[in-house]
Image: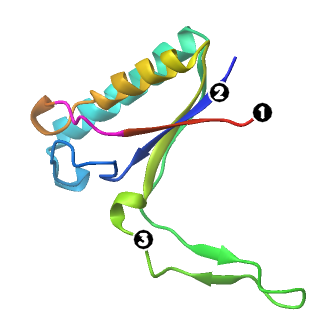
Amino acid sequence: MPKYLLLKHYRGGPEPHHPFPPMDEWAPQDVEAHMAFLHNVAKVLEERGEYVDARALTPNRLWVRYGGPDAAPVTTDGPHPETSDLVAGWYMIDVESRERALEIAAYISSEPGPGGEPIYEWIDVREIMS
C-alpha cells in the first residue's frame, strides 16, 4: 500500500483560501474544537488501519548545515522563507490508493476554524518514495 505525507502549512497553498487569523488569536473554544477534530481524524485513521503518524510543529525553526571536516555545524535562525512555506504539521498515512489519500486530505481541509467555520486549508499531498 502506498504511504502519503499530508502536510499542513501555516497559511500556505497554491492560491489564497478562506482567510483566518493566526490560531493564537482564536477563542479558546475554537482552538479546542479544531484540535479535537484533528485528534479525531487520527483516531478514525487508526481504526481503519491507515494511520502511521501525525505531529504538529511550532513555527520556531533553526537552519543547520555541515560546517566542514574540522568545524562545528553552521546554524542560523534566518533569513526565513515566507510564512506560508512553514510546515505546521503532518499526517503520515498508509492507504490503498491515491484517491483515498486525496479523500482524507479533503476531509482534513474541512477542519473547523474560528466560529466553527471550515478553514478550507490547502493540504500538500506527497507520496513517500519506496
Mark number for residue 3? 2
Q: Residue at x 34, y 53 (%)?
A: 10
Please tell me which of labels 1 and 3 falls first in the chain. Answer: 3
User: For the residue marked with disc 2, what is the amino acid?
Assistant: Lys
Query: Disc 2 versus disc 3: distance between alpha carbons?
Result: 28 Å
Region in magenta: 118-122
Please tell me which of labels 2 and 3 falls first in the chain. Answer: 2
Q: Residue furthest bottom?
A: 70
Residue 13 x, y percent position in the rendering: 34, 48
Q: Which residue is mark 3?
A: 81
Residue 41 x, y percent position in the rendering: 42, 22
Above or below, 119 against 81 in this view is: above
Q: Indicate the quadrant where residue 34 lies.
A: top left
Q: Secondary structure at mark 2?
A: strand
Q: Residue furthest left?
A: 115
**Tags 2 and 1 in contact by the CB under 8 Å rule?**
yes
Q: Which residue is mark 1?
A: 130
Q: Residue at x 59, y 30 (%)?
A: 4
Q: Indicate the quadrant where residue 127 lies.
A: top right
Q: Indicate the quadrant where residue 114 lies.
A: top left
Above or below, 68 against 12 in this view is: below
Query: Disc 1 versus disc 3: distance between alpha carbons?
Result: 29 Å
Q: Main secondary structure of the magenta part?
A: loop
Residue 102 x, y percent position in the rendering: 45, 23
Q: Secondary structure at mark 1?
A: loop
